[in-house]
Image: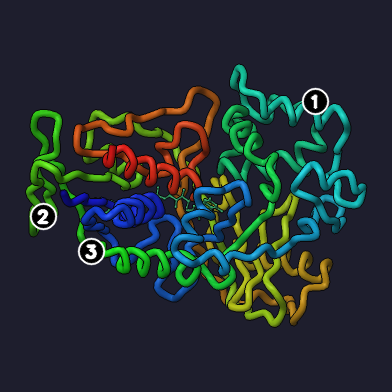
Amino acid sequence: MTTHVIGAGIAGLAAALALAEAGRPVVLHESAPNAGGRCRALPDGTDNGTHALLGANTAALGLLRRIGALEGWVEPEPGGLPVLDLRDHRAFRVALSPLGWRDAALRPPGLTGRALLALARLAVPGRDRAVGAAMAAHPEFHRGFVDPLVIAALNTPSAEASANRLGAVLRRLGGRGATRLLVARSGLGPDLVVPALAALERAGATIRFGARLRRLVTQGGRVQALDFGEDAVALGAGDAVVLATPPWESQRLLPHLETPLAYAPIVNLHYAHPNPGPVRFIGMLEALCQWVLVRPAGVSVTVSAGDAAAREEAATLGPRAWAELREAALAFGLAGDWPEAAPPCRVVKERRATPRHAPGPPLRPPRLPLANLALAGDWTDPVLPATIEASVRSGEAAARALMR
Ligand SMILES: Cc1cc2nc3c(=O)[nH]c(=O)nc-3n(C[C@H](O)[C@H](O)[C@H](O)COP(=O)(O)OP(=O)(O)OC[C@H]3O[C@@H](n4cnc5c(N)ncnc54)[C@H](O)[C@@H]3O)c2cc1C
C-alpha cells in the first residue's frame, strides 16, 4: 500500500505529509539534490525568490503550522505597506485591506467610490476579460493598487491577466486577517523546506534525492511501474502515485494531459547587504523593483511578470535596482548604511516561474487521470492562480483522492 510521490516541491511535500500522517507508507522521489522546487533555498542559503503569503492562504499556513514552522513567518509591515512612487518620488503607506482605507493616510492612489466599486465587481464571477480593460476607467487606482496586486498574485501583466482569476483571490481577502502579508524571517530553507522534510521523516516517509522519474509504465488505465533509469519500481495492487512535477514535466510523463502553454518569468536580485534592523517589505511604483525585502542576511528585489528584466544582463540590472531601492530605504529611514555603490548581487531568473493567467476558463485537469495516479501541482488548482496556496491545496486534494 505504498504511495510514491514524484516531486518534492510544495505540492509533493504537502501530499506526502498528508499521506504519511494518515499512516500510509510514503516514498518521495525528487530529481534535484534538494527539495522545494520553485520555492527553494539555493546552495548558498539564498531563496530562489522572495515568497510572500497572505493571511487568506489558509492551506499554506495550515501546512506551516503542522510542520512547526509558522513562527518563522513574520508580518513585516503591520501598519500598512510602505510604497515609494518613482513617478513623483512620493513615499506613503497603503493598507492592503479596504477596511484600512477608512484611514485617509492609508488609501491607495486614485481611490474613489467608483474605483472601489469596479474592484468589488471584479470579485463577482462573470464574463472573463483582462483586468487592465476592466479597470480602464480608473487609471490611477489601477496603476497604484490593482496592477501591482495582479502582478504579484497572478504573475501576469494586467493587460493580459484574467479578471476572474483575480476575482478568486479577491473573494478570499474578506475574512479577518486575510490581508496580513507574511514573509519567511530567515529564508525558505529554514522556515519551510527543512521543517517540512523533518516532519516527513518523523511521520516515517522515505525521501530519495537525485531520483528522476524517466517514464511511467502504464497498462489498463493503471501505473504498473516507475522507471527511474538505473532502477525501476514495480507497483503492487494497492500502491499508488502522486505526480507532483511541474506542468511541462507532467505533460512529458502523461502526453495526453492538457497543460498550460504560456509561462511568465520572475526575476529576483539578492544583494549581499546585511541589515541591523527588523525585516521590512517595501513596494515600489514605476520602478524596475516591485517589492524590496530587507532581512538581516541581505536585501532582495522581486520583479514578477518580468519578461523585460529576464532579457536584461545582470550587470545592468544590479546597479539599476540598487539605485531605486536605496532611494526607498532612505525615504523610509531604514536602519543601516545605504551606500551609493551597489553591493555584490546575485540575479536569479526563474523563466517558467508560473503559468500566465489569461482570461478564459481554467484548465481543470483531472485529479485522477489514472486509477492509481493522482495529479498535484500549483497549475492543477481549478480556482486559484499558481501559488504556494494552490500547491498545498493540490497536494492535499491528491492525497485525499487516493485515500478515498
Ligand atoms: C521566483 C518565484 C517567486 C514566487 N513567489 C511566490 C509568492 O510570493 N507567493 C506564492 O504563493 N507563490 C510564489 N511563487 C509560486 C510558487 O513558488 C509555486 O507556485 C510553487 O512553488 C509550485 O510548487 P509545485 O510543487 O506545484 O511545483 P514545483 O515547485 O515545480 O515542484 C516540482 C518538483 O518536481 C521535481 N521534478 C521535476 N521533474 C521530476 C521528475 N521527473 N522526477 C522527480 N522529480 C521531478 C522538481 O525538481 C521540483 O522539485 C513564486 C515562484 C517563483 C519561481
Neighbour tally class for label 1: few under 14, some 14-19, many 20 plus, Cα within 10 Å? few
On the image, numbered disc 1 is attached to which residue?
Answer: 137
Give the secondary structure at mark 3.
strand
Q: Position of residue 143 (x, y in %)?
A: 76, 40
Left or right relative to 347: residue 285:
right
Q: Amino acid at mark 1?
A: Ala
* Residue 140 location (% of width, % of height): 82, 37
Q: In this image, 102 relative to 208: left or right? A: right
Looking at the image, residue 253 sits to the left or right of residue 236; the answer is right
Which residue matches tag 2?
Answer: 229
- Mark earlier in primary sequence (3, 2): 3
Residue at 69% in and 50% down? 177
Q: Mark 1, mark 3: which one is toward the viewer?
A: 3
**CB at disc 1 and ligand 1 closer than 8 Å:** no
| Cα gap from disc 1 to disc 3, whole angstroms | 55 Å
> Measuring 75% from the left and 48% from the top, which residue is drawn there?
96
Q: Is residue 59 above or below residue 169?
A: below
Q: Which comes sooner in the sequence, label 1 or label 3?
A: 1
Q: Are marks 1 and 3 in contact (CB under 8 Å)?
A: no
Q: Quadrant of the C terminus?
A: top left
Residue at the spot x=27%, y=55% of the render?
A: 23
Pick the residue in front: 196 or 118: 196
Q: CA distance from mark 3 to mark 2?
A: 19 Å
Q: Which residue is mark 3?
A: 206
Q: Is residue 194 visible?
A: yes
Question: Which amino acid lies under the numbered mark 3 shown in the image of this protein?
Answer: Thr
Q: CA distance from mark 1 to mark 2?
A: 57 Å
Q: Residue 316, can we see it?
A: no
Label 1 secondary element? loop
Q: Quadrant of residue 335?
A: bottom right
